[in-house]
Amino acid sequence: MTKVVTILGARPQFIKAGSVSREFAKYDNFKEIIVHTWQHYDANMSDVFFDEMKIPKPDYFLGIGGKSHGAMTGQMIEKIEEVLLNEKPDWVLVYGDTNSTFAGAIAASKLHIKVAHIEAGLRSFNMKMPEEVNRILTDRISSILFCPTQTAIDNLQSEGVDKWNTQVELSGDVMQDGAIFYRELAEKPPGLTLDSKFILSTIQRAENTDSEKRLTAIVESLNEIAEQVSIVLPLHPRTKIKLEALPIKLSSRIKLIDPLGYLNMVWLIDNCKLVMTDSGGLQKEAFFFHKPCITLREETEWVELVEHNFNVLVGADKTRIITTFAEHTFSNDFNIDLYGNGFASNNIATALINYEK
């Protein structure tokens, strides 16, 4: 019997983990214990959420969130350690780059429990991002690194991974597994009237929302583009407050809606014409659903999307945003295999079962 404790802290991590958990459930010799640190409290994560998304409910709720990075991470390490001492797993499995990710990896490593890191090797090369620090340190103390892309492996090799006591696997991306699974369950947002062609946009990163100059440029760009095609903009309350403080207002052709459940977002991605976002995950989801993407950032962890011309980085430059929308010709060769074509979860489960070190 292989026993795994999975550490999660935010709704996107649960959605990713759902694909792997469904794969684990196929094996009689696998037992998974799920720990929710509660890093990001989400009122939408009720029992209904887990039932609709077909995700196992957590076995532990740690109730840690709403604190500074140091306080949050320290308390997570303490509470996760208690769980690990109680459960005595063979593996601790962590996802991505949150404080929960790093805390889980640290707690496990101190107890000499093997760590598996899903989404390993991703780099923005921006050390001002807390996520960049978390992912680098987590990679360094993991026993097995599940890399979604060859680019991620290349990043690790440039950091000297061959000299670490770790195993590197090109697993593919579990987000593509989830996209394939949830596409069949997607639901149109209730009460939303849409044109036959629309743009799906999100604005959420602090580098954009906390800068009046950048946010103004993005709003001006969206307003101008909205004269040609309608835009749907699901808006986090924090971003909404920032927008309301600007001297410029959003066009009436931009449909502001409250944050959506994942199945509603999948429907919008699947049915839109174009994605404009500063979200890392949405850049990939655009590719999974064969949509071009304009990214409102200066860099991306998903460089292969840019290299293959599915994605263009425009920052918060109004001229670049509008020109890219009006003139750029994106690739439409979506048959290329960049992320594993839906087999990442199977690859991960198989590698853990066959691990020999």
Image (tube, rainbow, N blue to C red):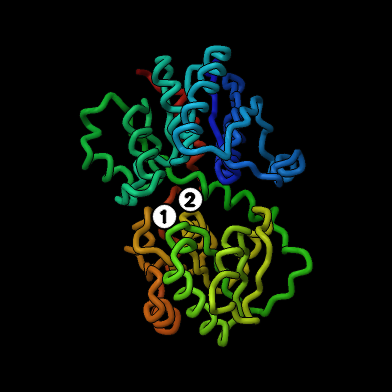
Question: What's under tag 2, amino acid-wise?
Answer: Asn
In-image side of 335 versus 12 (left or right): left
In-image side of 320 versus 221 (left or right): left
Q: Residue at x 66, y 25 (%)?
A: 59
In-image side of 323 versus 25 (left or right): left
Q: Residues within 10 Å of mark 1 (few under 14, many from 20)?
A: few
Residue 347 in the image: state x and y as whole percent: 46, 36
Marks 1/2 in contact by CB < 8 Å: the verdict is: yes
Position of 176 relative to 103 (above/below): below
Q: Residues within 10 Å of mark 2 (few under 14, many from 20)?
A: some
Is residue 160 visible in the rendered structure shown here? yes
Residue 334 in the image: state x and y as whole percent: 45, 64
**Quarter placement of the C terminus:** top left
Q: Which residue is mark 1?
A: 337
Q: Residue at x 40, y 63 (%)?
A: 297
Residue sitting at the far bottom: 227
Q: Residue at x 53, y 30 (%)?
A: 7
- 208, 35: nearer the viewer: 208
Query: Where is residue 305, by image quadrant?
Result: bottom left
Residue 219 in the image: state x and y as whole percent: 51, 75
**Quarter placement of the N terminus:** top right
Q: Which residue is mark 2?
A: 341
Is residue 19 visible in the rendered structure shown here? no
In-image side of 195 versus 201 (left or right): right
Secondary structure found at label 1: loop
Q: Measure the C-alpha gap from mark 1 to mark 2.
A: 6 Å
Residue 112 in the image: state x and y as whole percent: 40, 15
Position of 345 relative to 207 (above/below): above
- 34, 146: nearer the viewer: 34
Secondary structure found at label 2: loop
Question: What's under tag 1, amino acid-wise?
Answer: Asp
